[in-house]
Image (cartoon, coloured by chain):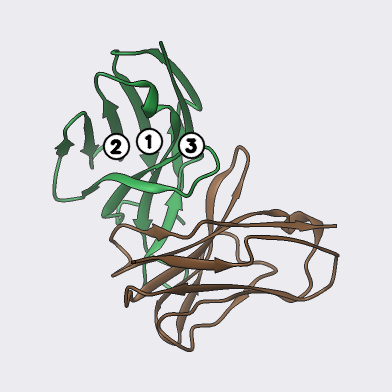
Chain colours: A green, B brown
Amino acid sequence: GENVEQHPSTLSVQEGDSAVIKCTYSDSASNYFPWYKQELGKRPQLIIDIRSNVGEKKDQRIAVTLNKTAKHFSLHITETQPEDSAVYFCAAIARGVSGGGNKLTFGTGTQLKVEL
Amino acid sequence: EAQVTQNPRYLITVTGKKLTVTCSQNMNHEYMSWYRQDPGLGLRQIYYSMNVEVTDKGDVPEGYKVSRKEKRNFPLILESPSPNQTSLYFCASSPLGNQPQHFGDGTRLSIL
């Protein structure tokens, strides 16, 4: 089955600096890679996603890059702000146990802290 | 308002006492899913459903059951809960599996 590894587990940056979180996946059939942000005590919320036919996607201060050959994808946050402090999860969609369907596997999360 | 509603939000119960956590969505989504969240382990998928009467195992299905008799509802059943099922549970839905998930507010289960 799919295995998603995420690094680092914690990341501390100064306000205004950039933050990069990296994930690798194992199933070459994976074709959809979302990123979720979870603030303390809240539900996860999608911040950006990318599909396997695209190498990069950007939305204001957030960007995601995908390298299918190496099977890794990364989240880039520029000009970080205190409100970016949260836990970030990457995920990958792959085949289900039965061979069909869409099974979603998450990374273990990165606690990002933006310091003033 | 588009939403995924889970009930209960909090539950403390004892080992072996069957319980059901309900999940309902009002967005006419095909795909629904259950996750458990544990410190250091992230979100792990328990079961998912591509459509009515179509369910499949996620990464950690042991000890759980689900059913999808109606499009809007996807209950999670713990037939004989054990302490290792103490966790924060999230239900989510999306139009299709490979699209953004909309999460509920979570259910915190404590099994003593």
Q: Secondary structure at mark 2?
A: strand
| Residue visible at 47% across and 78% down in the picture | B55
Q: Are marks 1 and 3 in contact (CB under 8 Å)?
A: no
Give residue A109's mark.
Answer: 3
Q: Nearer the viewer, residue B16 or A84?
A: A84
Q: Nearer the viewer, residue B56 or A41?
A: A41
Q: Position of residue A45 (x, y in %)?
A: 38, 48
Q: Nearer the viewer, mark 3 or mark 2?
A: 3
Q: Is residue A1 above or below residue B77?
A: above
Where is mark 2, residue-wise? Answer: A73
Q: Amino acid at mark 3?
A: Gly
Q: Amino acid at mark 2?
A: Phe
To the question of a shared chain for discs 1 and 3, the answer is yes
To the question of a shared chain for discs 1 and 2, the answer is yes
- Chain at numbered mark 2: A
Mark 3 to mark 2: distance in Å?
14 Å
- Chain at numbered mark 1: A
- Chain at numbered mark 3: A
Q: Secondary structure at mark 1?
A: strand
Mark 1 to mark 3: distance in Å?
10 Å
Q: Position of residue B38 (x, y in %)?
A: 63, 46
Marks 1 and 3, the one that precedes in the sequence? 1
Q: Position of residue B81 (x, y in %)?
A: 78, 67
Where is mark 1, residue-wise? Answer: A23
A74 relative position to A57: left or right = right
Q: Position of residue A98 (x, y in %)?
A: 45, 74
Q: Quadrant of the C terminus of chain A?
A: top left
Q: Nearer the viewer, residue B4 or A31?
A: B4
Marks 1 and 2, the one that precedes in the sequence? 1
Marks 3 and 2, the one that precedes in the sequence? 2
Q: Secondary structure at mark 3?
A: loop
Q: Amino acid at mark 1?
A: Cys
